[in-house]
Image: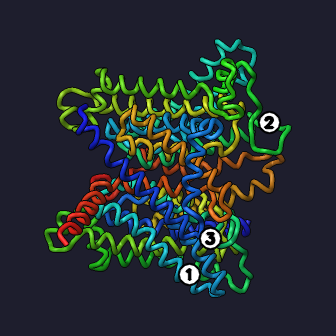
Amino acid sequence: MIDIFASALRLATPLIFAAMGGFLCERSGVATICLEAVLLTSAWTAASVTYFSHSPFLGTAAALWVGAMTMSIHSFLVTKTKADPIVSGVAVNLLALGVTPILTKLLFGSPTNTAALPLSERMSSELLLGLSFLLPFLLHFMVYKTGWGLRLLAAGDGPQALETSGVSPAKVRYGAMALGGAVVSLGGVYLSVAHASQFTREMAAGRGFIALAALIFGKWRPIPAFLTCLFFGLTDALQIHFQSSPLLGTTFPVQALQILPYLITLFVLVGFIGRAKPPLAIGKS
Amino acid sequence: MNRRHLFQVLLGPGLAILISALLTAGILLAFGESPAILWEAFTSTFFNGFGLGYTLFYTTPLILTGLSVALCFHAGLFNIGAEGQLHFGAAAIIGIALLFPHLPPFVAIPLGMLSSIVAGGVWGWIAGFLKAKRGSHEVIVTILLNFIGITFVNYLILYPFKNTQVQNPETLAISKSYFVPPLSDISAFFGSELFRTTPVNCTLFLSVIFAVICHFFLFKTVQGYELRALGQNASAARFNGISLTRNTMIAFTLAGALAGLVGVNEVMGFQHKLIEGFSPQYGFTGIAVALMARNNPIGIVLAAFLFGAIHNGAREIEFLSERISKEISIVMEALLIILIAGHQFFIAKIIHFFKRGSRD
């Protein structure tokens, strides 16, 4: 039983980082379906840089930078070239899905995974786990209690008003998205050099989308989204548990649990369990 | 359409193809490969029967998903749920074929097609219903429905329809009466070896026919006009008595039905069973196809062929090169989407660049 809860926390950690990064991006008024891309590029960078530099901290720093840059491609496409945010998000997701195995093959000979890291060169998962538990409260404070945060919220809910007051919503968005990308990257770092010891192809495995679902379920607020991530982590832990040990002597179809996060998010979204409304500027741009 | 207009329509995609090809060649150079293999790979996808057969096999589902996305785009809706819809369509064929294995081909083939249309259509309708009646954003809804649909289909593959004789996650085979004939059978009838041992099949004709039907539907029928009116100016259309609710559901149902037909190509035309993870992102590539063709159904056939060639060419590059893997096709796709989605900006930049150059 304790095992299941411990594994739930471990599985929730990357979701929390991704959801918190997504929180910053979406609240600044840009629909962001490319959290998955940032998880992939940052996980790849963390594993590769750590492998060649033998320093997990250097790997983490590089991953944060690459994650911020990946998200900045998205914000550039949306704010500068006026691309549709969904189209841009799809493109950035595809880009990460394609670039990571190509670079893996170039540097490590096989497109499927990077070379394994020794235990001494891995990031401490406890450190990241702890950070993921502090982050939602920190972001809550930063976004709702500081001037910067209020500008961010204004960029998402009333960009015209912000513009009138002399602040450029585009600039606020660039900043928020780069920071958001860096936050999501911590999830990628956790996946490849803390939870595992290498990057494997398609390592994010839809976590970027589950995190987005958690964000929606939490109605675009950091602390409810954080609690939702914990719950989704628990369903994931149960799913893995039932895969190995049959329930009441019968093999339990794990797909039923895999579907659960998406299904309940859908119920919230369509208004059967309260209603989730996105930031106003999303979808208008 | 006069000549000048046609030139303008083709300019954007043409430039995008050129730039992304140059960028890809640049990537190959940076990786220490000769860009000549890009040329070699692509000629082999067009100019021999084997390569062309595979290219056309990949073209088929991309025409269908491209149409699926474009139909919704015309109504001002975004369907990124084609991936889930096509999984449903494919699973329905397996279900029907296992339930009624002993039908004669002239009943079995239409029945199989119909089941994929209905299953895809129902899954599309759900998205349309939730958007129209509950006001949920269709993008988020279709993302969620993709995961739910694909996971459910994986369950069907692994449990009720599983072929327990093999280790692979795949279903039992469908009976022969459901097989859609491959094009190589037709060429063999005329004594030719064209398309021999390639999976391209008659579903290709079906998808081209559906492109023509979509064109007719969108531009020559009242229903199609209503969809386009909503897409261009929803409030004006509603003011004139066009129902947003009804048309949203119609658009998504038709889009789902088109995506569902991908199952015909995969199951009835080629594998004759369903394998977990059979779709290499056909649904998402459909977005690129629709964008490239600017949602024109006939343009979609051409754009689908281009993306089919990219997909097939990338497999060839992987074969020719020791350093590059086949995912280069996904990168090219992404570059094309980016260039087309932001084309106004990029074209303005290019014009600016040349203007400055001529002044110096």
Q: Identify which residue is drawn at 44% across, 47% down.
A: B288
Same-subunit check for callouts 3 and 2: no
- Which residue, given by chain and number where applicable, does mark 3 sit on? A191
Image check: B133 left or right of B259? left
Q: Which of A69 and B332 is in front in this view?
A: B332
Q: Which amino acid does label 1 sit on?
A: Thr
Q: Which of A2 and B173 is in front in this view?
A: B173
Mark 1 residue crowding within 10 angstroms, few (<14) / some (14–19) / many (20+): many
Q: Identify which residue is drawn at 39% across, 32% down.
A: B297
Task: Say if A84 sits above or below A27 in the image.
Answer: above
- Which residue, given by chain and number where applicable, does mark 1 sit on? A60
Q: Which amino acid does label 3 sit on?
A: Leu
CB-based contact (under 8 Å), mark 1 and mark 3: no
**Disc 1 to disc 3, C-alpha distance:** 12 Å
Indicate the secondary structure of the residue bearing disc 1. Answer: helix
Image check: B168 left or right of B323? right
Q: Can residue A230 be seen in this view?
A: no
From the image, which quarter does the C terminus of chain B lie in? Answer: bottom left
Image check: B45 left or right of B138? right
Indicate the secondary structure of the residue bearing disc 3. Answer: helix
Q: Mark 1 lies on which chain?
A: A
Which image quadrant is residue A44 in? bottom right
Mark 2 residue crowding within 10 angstroms, few (<14) / some (14–19) / many (20+): some
**Disc 3 to disc 2, C-alpha distance:** 34 Å
**Disc 2 to disc 1, C-alpha distance:** 45 Å
Q: Position of residue B122 (x, y in %)?
A: 51, 30
Q: Mark 3 lies on which chain?
A: A
- Which residue, given by chain and number where applicable, does mark 2 sit on? B163
